[in-house]
Amino acid sequence: MGSWKAEELQYHIRCRPGDVGRYVLLPGDPGRVPKIASYLTDAKQVAQNREYLVYTGSIDGIPVSVCSTGIGCPSTAIAVEELVRCGADTFIRVGTSGMMQDYMKAGDLVIATAAIRDEGTSQQYLPLAFPAVADPTIVAAFIDACRQNSIRYHTGVVHSKDSFYGEVEAVRMPLADQLKGRWKAWVAGGALCSEMEAATLFIVSSVLGKRAGALMLAEAHDGMDDLCRMAVAGIRQLIARDSSS
């Protein structure tokens, strides 16, 4: 691709500076972008290419965007890199996950404080000894949003992986014993849920000097309204905090 210029159309997400807000919600599924964007004011599609569908609207008069990442860490890293080049600096993963603790209930929300780097993309950015952590101001904003709206939530470490079937059908894999042993360790350590993007989102954002967080729905597809409402409520909290700082 050669050297990048500020005014250039980004190769994958097909956006330019001015197309997106500084705050971006990142679902994996392009099909969820219009639904999440419907909770914004005057949201409109600004780009679509490959797995990347981008809408931009506003919250309290401040531009906010929604950009799908596709499934997994490699495409997530590309989205964040190119969104930063378009002016974004605050990223929230919004999606579904598999819960890992018995005390959790389907439909609970999970606010990630950090992510287990059980994936390969982030290792192209920083060694595994470097932790994948969420920005504390984002964590605090989403906790406040859930509390104010009486939404059941959990905060803690999440698990990011590369292989969906390596988790859900581990028994048939050649590395079954290793996969099951590692899963048991993550659960024993208190990991809340398993998903496929947060660790790389946190690491890439750290490298680029930007903020990132993750809000996820545990084991349910009929709780999307709560997820969308809290995603917007959390961004609203961030906007208020940023404007007063």
Image (cartoon, rainbow, N blue to C red):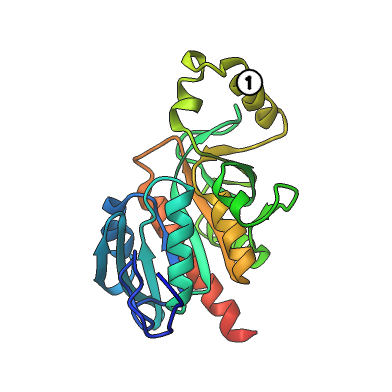
Any part of residue 232 in sight: no
Residue 39 horizontal side relative to residue 196, left or right: left
Residue type, label 1: Gln
Q: Residue furthest front?
A: 2
- Residue 85 versus residue 146 in the image, above or below: below
Residue 229 coordinates in the image, percent (x, y): 41, 59
Q: Position of residue 240 (x, y in %)?
A: 55, 79
**Location of residue 107 with respect to 3 vertically, above or below:** above
Tell me: 30 left or right of 157.
left
Give the residue displayed 40% in from the left and 69% down from the top. Answer: 1
Please determine whether, in this image, residue 60 is positioned above or below residue 195: below
In the figure, is residue 229 to the left or right of 142? left
Residue plotted at (60% across, 77% down): 241
In depth, the one of 70 and 98 nearer the eye is: 70
- Is disc 1 placed on a helix, strand or loop? helix
Q: Is residue 9 visible?
A: yes
Quarter of the view holding residue 100:
top right
Question: x and y percent of residue 140 in the render?
Answer: 64, 63
**Residue at screen point 65% across, 26% down:** 182
> Going by the image, does 177 lie left or right of 230?
right
x%, y% of residue 25? 43, 63
Q: How many marks?
A: 1
Name above or below for residue 124 compared with residue 20.
Answer: above
- Which class describes the residues within 10 Å of circle 1: few (<14), some (14-19), or many (20+)? few
Which residue position is annotated with label 1?
Answer: 178
The C terminus lies in which quarter of the figure? bottom right
Q: Residue at x 63, y 20 (%)?
A: 178
